[in-house]
Image: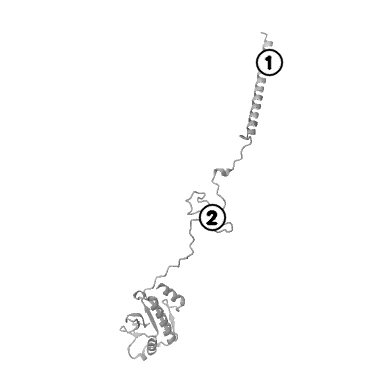
Amino acid sequence: MDKEILRIVIIVTGVVVVVAMLAWAYIKDKRSREDMEFYDDEGDYDDEAEEIDPRDDFDIIPLGVKSNVDAHHHAPDKSARYYDEDDDEPYYEDEEEDDEVEPPPRAAAPEIIQFSIITKADEDFNGADLVDAFKMVGLEYGSLKIFERLDPNRLVDFGVACIVEPGTFPDKDLENFYCPGLVFFMQPEALDNAQGVFDDYIETIHLIAEKLDGVILDHRRQPLTNATIQAIRQSL
């Protein structure tokens, strides 16, 4: 075969192959579009990408309810917390409302309650005046040479001594005896009715202080107040 004719045949064959490939590609593309339209019409497929909510991978918590597990996966709360529509304050479903408020713990009663009376002026209390004041409130002179409050069984409820050592009062020559102050003391643990004795104790101190025109001091050597009295009484 002539070389010129062979070259023409090769060129024509190449053109035919290229045209055939283009035609096949066109037909295939057309079929693909037809298939896509078919699925759209049936509602089974949409060529537009479906919009994905990024929250779909997480649990959605309704408004008004707090999750029992935080972002760091700590242990759950004791109960779910809810909010009223008209109230910002939370309440807990599992918690029971307690209308009663527990009173504060009662302070421990002191082993010995000790108050004192001192003079206002520079002059000390005279022995004779002291005895008159003690008799006025029913205190008795005891074997320990101090004055005492005795119960119906002749047991000591509380006592009063001189503020300076040895704390005793003489049984005679009282006009020449002077005392700068008095110490009153009671031991609550030894009493059956500590509060009742304490009330008598406070009343007796006030009566003697008024009789002698003295100043009442507490166990810290400060003026005795009603707050201190009530705090001690409640501890008994």
* Residue that numbered label 2 is attached to: 82
Residue 154 at x, y = what percent?
A: 32, 82
Q: Pick whichever, 71 or 173, lies toward us.
A: 71
Position above or below: 32 against 125: above
Q: Which residue does the image show at 58% across and 43% down from the upper left?
A: 54
Q: Pick whichever, 132 or 61, lies toward us.
A: 61
Residue 151 at x, y = what percent?
A: 34, 81
In this figure, which colouring scheme has been used for the structure?
A: one colour
Position above or below: 158 against 63: below
Q: Quadrant of the N terminus?
A: top right
Would residue 145 be found to the left or right of residue 13 on screen? left
Would residue 218 be found to the left or right of residue 190 on screen? right
Q: Quadrant of the C terminus?
A: bottom left
Q: Which residue does the image show at 66% across and 20% down from the upper left?
A: 20
Q: Mark on residue 12?
A: 1
Position above or below: 173 against 197: below
Per the model, the C-alpha gap separating discs 1 and 2 is 84 Å
- Residue 23's quadrant in the figure? top right
Would residue 71 be found to the left or right of residue 127 on screen? right
Q: Considering the numbered disc 1 on the image, is that residue within a helix, a strand or a loop? A: helix
Identify residue type, mark 2: Tyr
Circle 1 crowding by C-alpha within 10 Å: few under 14, some 14–19, many from 20: few
Precedes in sequence: disc 1 or disc 2: 1
